[in-house]
């Protein structure tokens, strides 16, 4: 029996082990970098999500009350001037006046550009505000209407600021 000695440059068992360990260390290092970057840049969707989750049934009830009101909203946004106008009518198509409207506007992906705007009553169920300095693109608009310091109407929509 003639067993030849391995030639110089041949693949040995410890080479395979080193390649395998190197591969998995590289994968783990890349995963660690990606996880750290994801965790450090994600601001979260909802502030105080736990408490809002506990109040979810109340939120559903408020939505049911709002649906029973039968109110309708007509929203316009002029990209050129930045003028936001919201008209509210009841189930009989009569204007709803005497409310305090507030709009929260921001990007869907970050809270850096979020801002709150009070809409002024213009009569005949219409409320408006000038939103200056809004950059181009899609924005999320959340409107709440209050009467006697109690929110009676909420809506959420996307608006588009054209270039």
Image (cartoon, rainbow, N blue to C red):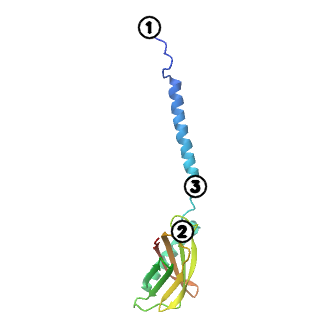
Q: Residue 76: give x, y in percent of width and height.
A: 45, 81
140 versus 4 height, above or below: below
Of all residues, the one furthest to the left in this rendering is 92
Whether residue 31 is visible here, answered yes or no, is yes
* Left/right of residue 70 with respect to residue 32 in the rendered view: left
Q: CA distance from mark 2 to mark 3?
A: 22 Å
Mark 1 surroundings: few (<14), some (14-19) or many (≥20) residues within 10 A = few
9 versus 69 height, above or below: above
Label 2: which residue?
53
- Earlier residue among tags 2 and 3: 3
* Quarter of the figure with residue 95: bottom left
At a point 57% along the width and 88% down the height, the residue shown is: 148
Label 3: which residue?
39
Q: Residue 80: give x, y in percent of width and height.
A: 48, 77
Q: Residue 147: give x, y in percent of width and height.
A: 55, 87
Q: CA distance from mark 3 to mark 1?
A: 60 Å
Of all residues, the one furthest to the top in this rendering is 1
* Quarter of the figure with residue 150: bottom right
* Residue 24 vs residue 163, the one in the foreground: 163
Mark 3 surroundings: few (<14), some (14-19) or many (≥20) residues within 10 A = few
- The numbered dot on residue 2 is 1
* Residue 149 vs residue 55, the one in the foreground: 149
* Residue 67 vs residue 93, the one in the foreground: 93
Q: CA distance from mark 2 to mark 1?
A: 76 Å
């Amino acid at each position: 029996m003639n067993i030849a000695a391995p030639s110089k440059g041949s693949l040995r068992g410890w080479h395979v082990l080193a390649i395998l360990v190197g591969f998995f260390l590289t994968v783990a290092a890349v995963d660690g970098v990606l996880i750290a970057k994801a965790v450090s840049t994600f601001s979260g969707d909802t502030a105080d999500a736990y408490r809002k989750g506990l109040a979810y049934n109340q939120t559903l009830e408020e939505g049911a009350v709002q649906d029973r009101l039968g109110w309708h909203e007509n929203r316009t946004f002029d990209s050129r001037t930045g003028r936001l106008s919201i008209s509210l009518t009841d189930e009989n198509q009569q204007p709803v006046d005497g409310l305090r409207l507030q709009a929260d506007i921001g990007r869907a992906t970050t809270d850096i550009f979020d801002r709150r705007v009070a809409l002024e009553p213009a009569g005949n169920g219409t409320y408006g505000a000038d939103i200056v300095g809004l950059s181009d693109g899609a924005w999320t608009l959340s409107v709440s209407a209050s009467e006697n310091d109690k929110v009676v109407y909420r809506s959420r929509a996307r608006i588009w600021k054209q270039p």
